[in-house]
Image (cartoon, helix red, strand yellow):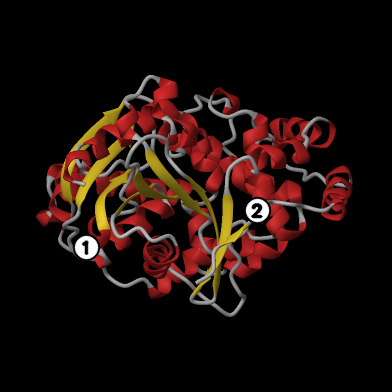
Amino acid sequence: MIVQNFNIDISNEPIHDLSVRLKNTRWTSGKESLKWEYGTNQAYLKDFVSYWIEEYDWKKQEKQLNSYPQFKCTIDDVDIHFFHIKGKGENPTPIILTHGWPDSFIRYQKIIPILTDPTRFGRNSNDSFDVIIPSVPGFGFSTLSHSKGINNADIADLWKKLMTEALGYEKFGALGGDVGSGVTRYLAYKYPEHLIGIHLTDAGIIRDIVFADNHQNLSTEEKQYKQTALQWISQEGGYMSIQSTKPQTLSYGLSDSPVGLSAWILEKFYSWSDCNGNLENRFNKDELLNNIMIYWLSNSIGTSNHLYYENTHSLPKIGKITVPSGMALFSKDVLLPPKKWVETNLNVIHWTDIPEGGHFTAMEAPDLFADDVIKFYHNFRTNR
């Protein structure tokens, strides 16, 4: 298993093609709303695209991303791209961070310096980490063949091999949110002997509650969760229905139109974040565009969408997780899980209710996120 150095190096041709497509956008007609209730607001999107054309500098952003050590290796015929930043100080804790959809490795960029060099930010030098951030297969620069389907459990298998065989870590931590939460839970369930502990920011959609046949067996908190989840699926889950049933049909349009791709992604960042009606309360245009550019330049929106199909049709059942688990719940995230259910299904030793931030946790409130990760893993420092 050969690990090779990797740099992001996009040639001028796709950048020029992107510029032409943006300038030749055919804008949709229809009712417009400043409140985004019909979807991505066109006035905001036009301003966003103008910035993209006139001010955004991909090569500058590419150079900044390449300041972090990046690598590639092939595991089970899957080409994995990952960041691997060694921590300062003695005996850093290795930890693998798994992103979700529609984000990317960009999700964790802001916390890399805090976790790898905590003394720079007023934290204890003993609380440093070796940070590994892979791109989920089919996302960004982790390529996935058109013939290969992959689900969260399969990705957990790849991550175990990445950490133990490719990088040589026998024991390690793991964290994730969104898709990353599911992958991390399968990693802990299937390979508990290798996990120090797992840190999660959500529990996904808890289908055992949402689709429970016997409503009477649910606790009051679980009944409330079921009602909230069904309402959320009805009002916000259209993307999920499409991507888990007919992802390829959607992918043609999103792969052909950068504005269409942006609208699809930006609407989720708006709806799921703690932005209070203004995206740029939580994200600047450059970081939003960096995330979109990862999808566009790698042409990976199609393969990323397919993950929903595979998780719907081939994901095996997961049992109780015995690995020590920490939960950090951000107050404006979607579908906050019932505490009793989490404690029944995971070995919870750490629980934090964070008073701000939404679904894109480490992007929205990086200091609060990093502090909670450090606090959780501090429990295991003396045992290593």
- The image quarter containing residue 329 is top left
Please indicate whether residue 41 sits to the left or right of residue 111 in the image.
right
Q: Residues within 10 Å of mark 2 (few under 14, many from 20)?
A: many
Given residues 377 and 246, the one toward you in this image is 377
Q: Residue at x 51, y 75 (%)?
A: 149
Amino acid residing under circle 1: Glu
User: What is the C-alpha distance between the residues marked 2 and 1?
Assistant: 34 Å
Question: x%, y% of residue 164?
Answer: 36, 64
What secondary structure is marked by label 2?
helix
Residue matched to label 2: 295
In the picture, measured across the screen, residue 294 lies left or right of residue 135, that is right
Q: Is residue 50 left or right of residue 322?
A: right
Rendered position, 23 above or below 205: above
Q: Nearer the viewer, mark 2 or mark 1?
A: 1
Residue at mark 1: 193
Residue 290 point in image, percent of width and height: 66, 41
Q: Is residue 329 visible?
A: yes
Q: Are marks 2 and 1 in contact (CB under 8 Å)?
A: no
Query: Against 171, is 108 above or below?
Result: above
Q: State whether residue 278 is above or below residue 202.
A: above
Residue furthest toward the front?
90
Quarter of the figure with residue 127: top left
Please name the residue shown 34% across and 28% down the image.
125
Q: Earlier in the sequence, mark 2 or mark 1?
A: 1
Extreme residue in the top direction? 122
- Could you tell me residue 291's position as x and y percent? 62, 44
Whole-percent x, y for residue 48 in the image: 73, 33
What type is the residue that disc 2 sits on?
Answer: Tyr
Looking at the image, residue 283 sits to the left or right of residue 182; the answer is right
At horizontal 60% and vertical 25% (from top left) the residue drawn is 280
